[in-house]
Amino acid sequence: FEPLSPELVVEVGYDAMEGDRFRHTAQFKRWRPDRDPLSCRYDQLERPLSLSVDDVLGTVV
């Protein structure tokens, strides 16, 4: 693990998060030169709706 210094901001798309990490590969959207790197925090991320297998398939009787 090599920590990075916050110098640039990039906007990404993602499907899911596991804890404080993206579960799958994040997709690059664009550079954000208008954003200050120190203003970007994990608590600003939208958490995608997570569904369990039971939610998707329903209860099997």
Image (cartoon, rainbow, N blue to C red):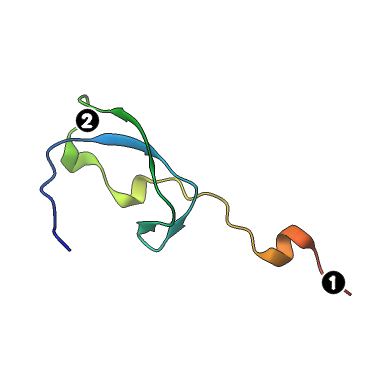
Residue 10: percent from left, percent from top: 27, 35
- Relative to 48, say whether 36 is above or below: above
State the image quarter where residue 29 is shown. top left
Local crowd size for mark 2, using a 10 Å CA cut-off: few (<14), some (14–19), many (≥20): few
Which residue in the protein does label 2 denote?
Answer: 35
Residue 23: percent from left, percent from top: 43, 57
Label 2 or label 1, whichever lies nearer to me, is: 1
Who's the residue at 26% across and 28% down the image?
31
Local crowd size for mark 1, using a 10 Å CA cut-off: few (<14), some (14–19), many (≥20): few
What amino acid type should be assigned to the residue bearing mark 2?
Arg
Q: Secondary structure at mark 1?
A: loop
What amino acid type should be assigned to the residue bearing mark 1?
Val
Residue 20: percent from left, percent from top: 35, 60
Tell me how far mark 2 sits from mark 1, CA to CA.
Answer: 49 Å
Dots 2, 1 in contact, CB < 8 A: no
Who's the residue at 25% across and 42% down the image?
40
Q: Is residue 37 left or right of residue 30?
A: left
Which residue in the protein does label 1 denote?
Answer: 60
Which of 27 and 16 lies nearest the eye of the viewer? 27
* Residue placed furthest toward the bottom: 61
